[in-house]
Amino acid sequence: ISSSLGIVFFSIYYEVRRAQVSAAPDVDMQAATLQTLNEAFLVSAIVLLVALPFSFILKGVQDDEDESSQKQA
């Protein structure tokens, strides 16, 4: 479900931002498209960098719970 929401978010962001950039009088549609794609990739990279440490933290918690349950058994 989260990947579907991510795709929807980026497609809406792409269309809205491209319309905003192309509304400027000195920017053509191709330049607006390229700028919007660059921004979308930067946003996804930032989200990835923020989420990556959390994945290691949550993985460690699960491993600790498995070790403690094995010791009790």
Image (cartoon, grey):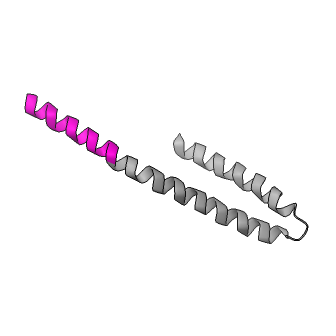
Q: From what the image shows, is residue 62 above or below residue 48?
A: above
The region drawn magenta spans 57-73
Q: Point out residue 26 in the picture as x, y percentages from the top left corner.
A: 88, 71
Q: Point out residue 68 in the picture as x, y percentages from the top left corner.
A: 15, 34
Q: As drawn, is 45 to the left or to the right of 23?
A: left
Residue at image location 15% in from the left, 31% down from the top: 69
Give the farthest residue toward the right. 25
Residue at image location 56% in from the left, 57% down from the top: 44
Residue 73 shows in the view: no
Residue at image location 65% in from the left, 47% down from the top: 9
Q: As drawn, is 67 to the left or to the right of 44?
A: left
Q: From what the image shows, is residue 62 above or below residue 44?
A: above
Residue at image location 53% in from the left, 42% down from the top: 2
- Report the quarter where the C terminus lies: top left
Q: As drawn, is 50 to the left or to the right of 39?
A: left
Relative depth, front residue between 4 and 43: 43
Residue 42 shows in the view: yes
Residue 24 magenta: no
Q: From what the image shows, is residue 54 above or below residue 26?
A: above
Q: Point out residue 42 in the picture as x, y percentages from the top left corner.
A: 59, 62
Image quadrant assignment for residue 22: bottom right
Q: From what the image shows, is residue 9 above or below residue 14?
A: above
Main SS of residues in magenta: helix
Figure label count: 0
Image quadrant assignment for residue 59: top left
